[in-house]
Image (spheres, helix red, strand yellow):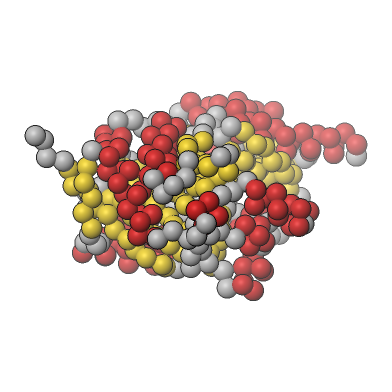
């Protein structure tokens, strides 16, 4: 009889957002470097507003509200959208490699891991199911959102499980239209999400919740989990990561300059997520001066967006689409249900506003 592999499980407890993000960076980079074994991590946050890696804090969050309420603002190392996180949610993360998963296709990875997590959640007494592209739901209501990031052959795949979540507070943290904060809109938002407390009639035992998820992953991958801690090399890497992440420079790195007023904007919802585009145009020369792309989407490597922005700087408007295709033809990138045409559509929509303005001047 073949002996099962042993993977590590760690529970890093309730922490500040910067510490949790630094641990993400540590464990993903450590796994790629060979100092971190295959690991399942459980975590919880003190009240935090978390940006996706490509998002702008000014665009996505009510920064003044967060300051008034003592809510930390941080940036994840993964893509996706802005979320509110606090003690009423449990986070889980897997650090694995492509060989273990048998694929580098993020949509296939999402399905496999989410279906396993759903089976674990279901053992608590609810009917949890995977919902493409990366959610877990109960009776059509979202109970867990997930996402992932690659670093070479290593992957971090993470999920959030709602236990006793305050939807209204989340809505007040996010920068959304005021009408979405009406009593009717808040009630509607509550109907779209599910909490374990509401489904089960009481807050479940957190130890049991974690055991259920651990067991589901153990069965899915044919392994056993053994409790552990960070090793000395990971501790050293964690110190370096925290020094980088626990700074305004990290948190606000993708903010658009506040003094950029003559900027055309467009928002596009595609199968791959929500994309916001802002374009500064030299109308006399009909050229793109600068472009900013943010939003709720997943790409690897993460710097691809910055590289695309750089490639389109000072581009003739008439050559924009051609230059986007040329960029992707020579740039190896993994995208979750996102296509190069989505970038072209979003940028074109912003530029159409410029042409309309020029035509009515």
Q: Is residue 144 visible?
A: yes
259 vs 132, left or right, is right
Residue 316 in the image: state x and y as whole percent: 67, 33
245 vs 356, left or right, is left
Q: Is residue 246 visible?
A: no
Residue for point 66% across, 42% down: 277
In the image, residue 353 sits, relative to residue 224, either above or below, namely: above
Rendered image quadrant of residue 354: top right
- Quadrant occupied by the C terminus: top right
Residue for point 80% across, 34% down: 355
Residue 238 in the image: state x and y as whole percent: 32, 63
Residue for point 33% across, 43% down: 216
- Quadrant occupied by the N terminus: top left
The total number of labels drawn is 0
Rendered image quadrant of residue 332: top left
Pick the residue in front: 176 or 242: 176
In the image, residue 38 sits, relative to residue 106, either above or below, namely: below
Pick the residue in front: 3 or 72: 3
Q: Residue furthest right?
A: 360
Pick the residue in front: 348 or 126: 126
In the image, residue 140 sits, relative to residue 260, either above or below, namely: above
Residue for point 62% across, 41% down: 275
Q: Residue furthest front?
A: 201
Residue 41 in the image: state x and y as whole percent: 33, 55
Rendered image quadrant of residue 111: top left
Pick the residue in front: 282 or 145: 145
Residue 43 in the image: state x and y as whole percent: 39, 60
């Amino acid at each position: 009889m073949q002996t099962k592999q042993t993977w590590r499980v760690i529970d890093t407890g309730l922490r500040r957002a910067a510490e949790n993000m630094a641990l993400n960076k540590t464990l993903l980079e450590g796994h790629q470097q060979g100092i971190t074994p295959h690991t399942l991590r459980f975590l919880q946050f003190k009240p935090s507003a978390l940006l996706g890696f490509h998002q702008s804090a000014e665009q996505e969050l009510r920064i003044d509200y967060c300051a008034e309420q003592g809510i930390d603002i941080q940036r994840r190392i993964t893509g996706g959208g802005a979320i509110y996180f606090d003690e009423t949610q449990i986070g889980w993360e897997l650090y694995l490699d492509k060989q273990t998963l048998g694929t580098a296709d993020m949509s296939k990875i999402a399905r496999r891991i989410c279906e396993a997590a759903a089976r674990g959640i279901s053992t608590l007494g609810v009917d949890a199911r995977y919902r493409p592209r990366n959610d877990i739901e109960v009776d059509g209501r979202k109970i867990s959102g997930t996402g992932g990031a690659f670093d070479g052959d290593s992957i971090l795949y993470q999920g959030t499980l709602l236990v006793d979540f305050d939807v209204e507070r989340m809505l007040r943290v996010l920068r959304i239209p005021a009408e979405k904060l009406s009593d009717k809109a808040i009630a509607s938002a509550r109907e779209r999400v599910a909490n374990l407390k509401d489904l089960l009639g009481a807050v479940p035992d957190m130890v049991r919740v974690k055991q259920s998820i651990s067991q589901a992953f153990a069965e899915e991958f044919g392994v056993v989990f053994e409790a552990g801690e960070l090793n000395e090399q990971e501790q050293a890497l964690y110190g370096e990561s925290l020094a980088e992440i626990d700074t305004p420079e990290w948190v606000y790195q993708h903010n658009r300059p506040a003094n950029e007023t003559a900027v055309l904007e467009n928002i596009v919802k595609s199968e791959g997520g929500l994309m916001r585009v802002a374009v500064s145009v030299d109308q006399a020369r009909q050229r793109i001066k600068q472009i900013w792309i943010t939003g709720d989407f997943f790409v690897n490597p993460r710097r691809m967006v910055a590289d695309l922005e750089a490639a389109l700087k000072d581009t003739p408007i008439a050559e924009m689409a051609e230059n986007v295709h040329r960029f992707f033809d020579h740039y190896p990138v993994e995208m979750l249900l996102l296509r190069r045409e989505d970038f072209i559509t979003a940028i074109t929509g912003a530029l159409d506003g410029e042409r309309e303005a020029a035509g009515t001047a």
